Amino acid sequence: MNKLLLETIICYLKEELSPGLFIHSAGVAETAVSLAELLGEDKNRAELAGWLHDCAREIPQQELLYLAEAGQLTIDPHCRLRPVLLHAAVGAIKARQLDVADEAVLTAISRHTLGFPGMSLLDRIIYVADKIEPGRSYPEVEVLRRKVAEDFHCGVIAVTAQTISHLLANRQLIHPLTISFWNSLSGSGSEANAGLLPLHS
Ligand SMILES: [Fe+2]
Ligand SMILES: [Fe+2]
């Protein structure tokens, strides 16, 4: 990967993001590199996607809607109701504007919030790194970190289950892509290890 591009992007993010979000982005990049090394994924791609995943997170909601429309993204009813969900897809547009041309990196950025059925390894690394980076401190995070370290696939399932549980507990809508992602995980072979069994058998 182009080291100069990464350095330029880190400088841009330091200027653009709040200190807290900058530190979170650094944590996601660091965690994503560790996971990539462990799992045989390209660590430069993981680092770049980790740094950039939330580059649109602090854009006001109305502007996110505007940028999504300008970028000809499909805005489903859930995202129209909660435009913050668009920060992932708009982040990919912004990353492209910052000269990131690697489609795998752009896709990982665009899928990090909602998930997507059949996500690539890089997609899943960014999705998981976002939830367990060192700055995260919610009650379940230590258990999730352990599960991810023990078995990445089971860790992805556990992280997704925690996300959905949190949404249910807070009476929030669950985006259809998150449900599709969950269902795709439940059909992928390690359900017994992960404690995930079909509801209808
Ligand atoms: Fe995000
Ligand atoms: Fe994030």
Image (cartoon, helix red, strand yellow):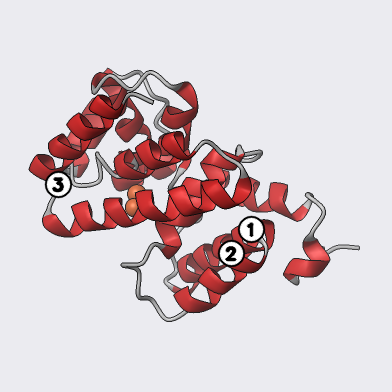
Q: Residue at x 54, y 77 (%)?
A: 143
Q: Is mark 2 within 8 Å of ligand 2?
A: no
Q: Secondary structure at mark 3?
A: loop
Q: Tell whether 78 sits left or right of 37.
A: left
Q: Tell me, for residue 17, which label it has, or none.
A: 3
Q: Tell whether 107 sits left or right of 183.
A: left
Q: Say whether disc 3 or disc 2 marks the residue closer to the N-terminus.
A: 3
Compared with 56, 95 (above or below) is above
Image coordinates of residue 44 in percent, x first then y, are: 42, 35
Question: From the image, which quarter does the C terminus lie in?
Answer: bottom right
Q: Residues within 10 Å of mark 3 (few under 14, many from 20)?
A: some
Q: Which residue is mark 2?
A: 148
Q: Are marks 2 and 1 in contact (CB under 8 Å)?
A: yes
| Closer mark to the observer between disc 3 and disc 1 | 1
Q: Tell me, for residue 152, which label it has, or none.
A: 1
Q: Residue at x 57, y 60 (%)?
A: 160
Farthest residue to the right: give it: 201
